[in-house]
Amino acid sequence: MKASDLFIRCLENEGVEYIFGIPGEENLDVMDSMIGSTIKFITTRHEQGAAFMADVYGRLTGKAGVCLATLGPGATNLVTGFADANMDHAPIIGIAGQGATTRMHKESHQILDLVNLFAPISKYSVQIREPEIVGEIVRKAFKAAEAEKPGGCFIDFPENIAAMQVEGKEPLKVQSAKPPVPPQDKISQAAEIISNARYPLVMAGNGVVRADANDALVAFAEKLNIPVATTFMAKGSIPFSHDLSLGTVGLQAQDYIACGFDRADVVICVGYDMIEYHPHLWNQEKTSKIIHIDMSPAEVDEHYILECGVIGDINAALKGIAAEAVPKSGSQAQTLREIIVEELTAHAENDSFPMVPQRIILDLRKALEPEDIVVSDVGAHKMWIARMYQAERPNTCIISNGFASMGIGLPGAIAAKLVFPDRTALTVTGDAGFLMNSQEIETALRIGVAIVILVWNDSKYGLIKWHQDRRFGRDTQIDFNNPDLVKYAESFGAKGYRVESAGDLLPILKKAIADNTVVLIDCPVDYSENMKLTEKLGNLVCPI
């Protein structure tokens, strides 16, 4: 068989369901070897869209999403989505065709050193130089991509190697290590610190979701009566409706939830990745006692000096500590939670138009079931979703946080619907981010996935205006013109609706979900609320 045949067999052996990508001249053998494969190839309209689909697939499943491109410009188009997955610790495998090894030693058409290009943004970047090593390379790539902490692995596959014959080789057995149980002395040390704390606070990070430790987190909080804040990427790891939930932390500004950190004498960081919310923002004075509970040792940072590190299986750590620690008495943060809930629901009846962000998010929450999935693109709307969207389940509000790349929303919603076809998959996107990968509407229609695209339309780079206004009191070069977004969607064969009053949005959302196809909703937004929020938070006085 050809090396490309073995390569596809290895991917099947790893349980790959989909490959997202675009065929090209230098991956001809790989594409041909997929004929008859159990793997479904999703032909996208841009390699960036393919990488974002693989990114969100990996985040939702814990299995590496796979994206494929040809050499040169095809491979460089993968970089943004691939880097997003790697920085957000989503498992992803990037594959690119490459020119023949016989011309890589010299200046040659479309040849780039892709291994070194991807090396800084991946856990493992490699070129297949001999057909005999295909099995080892594929197994190593998936092992690294799916290990805790997950990330990206890149494989460069020269066209002449792909076409070579290989005999006597089979895919390698898939193996993964079971996470170790944390040392008992560390569990006891953490329990003692928590028992002696006056105002402990949990910060749950993305590692809780990756470890499927959501139930253990809730049980830990309930047993010890400790309030929980989540990062953007851990939204829903404790339901927002839970009495011990303080919502989401992560805005780089003083917020109500930050008051809980100001008061806390012990911060229990569970599955926390430093890139989610840097400790200099919540431990400025370096006075908080920090307990680090994670599969991996803590990153070194002067604002993140540990009182205790509990390294190993997160579920086992939470259960062990909860069994030994003394529960806290009284209401640890009920007043703060009541203020947060009141603030998040204050605009439920705001009928102003264009719509305020708060009303849009409240109506969105009303339209969706707890298990439905919202994929946020990046822009001013992301900050409102991160702060206000009330997630009840883990991985139901997908936010690009570490790399924070615009354009992820629409491709991400396609991946979410492929993973969970019985749930509603909806992307909230700005008009700028939407048009960066809007061509993937055609992909969604062609493969038959129903998604809803809620576009917050202000004809501006709204987040940049927000930053410019905060810093300089004026803005520049942030305006642009949009096409008629409803007609644009309809030109692909999708449906389109335009919101013309605040009362329109909720019934339109319900209709769009019932339509069971690709639907775009053009919703004008009033981003003057951005500066109102900035002023409000700037004058905030902590209530506790």
Image (cartoon, rainbow, N blue to C red):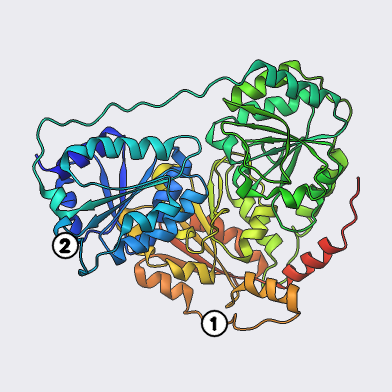
Q: Position of residue 524 (x, y in %)?
A: 61, 72
Amino acid carrying mark 1 in the image: Phe
Residue 421 visible at all:
no
Q: Earlier in the sequence, mark 2 or mark 1?
A: 2
Report the Cα–Cα distance between label 2 and label 1: 44 Å
Q: Residue at x 87, y 58 (%)?
A: 540
Residue at which label 1 appears? 480
Q: Position of residue 454 (x, y in %)?
A: 54, 62
- Closer to the camera, 193 or 483? 193
Mark 2, secondary structure of its residue: helix
Specify whether 467 is left or right of 140.
right
Q: Residue at x 27, y 59 (%)?
A: 22
Look at the picture and state if 185 lies above or below 33.
above
Amino acid carrying mark 2 in the image: Arg
Q: Residue at x 79, y 69 (%)?
A: 532
Residue at which label 2 appears? 103
In the picture as drawn, the residue positioned furthest to the front comes out as: 105
Q: Position of residue 37 (x, y in %)?
A: 19, 41
Look at the picture and state if 350 lies above or below 145.
below
Residue 321 visible at all:
yes
- Please rate how many residues cluster around mark 1, counting C-alpha atoms within 10 Å: few if below 14, some from 14 to 19, many from 20: few
Q: Position of residue 56 (x, y in %)?
A: 45, 49
Q: Residue at x 73, y 29 (%)?
A: 221
The numbered mark at residue 228 is none
Number of numbered discs present?
A: 2
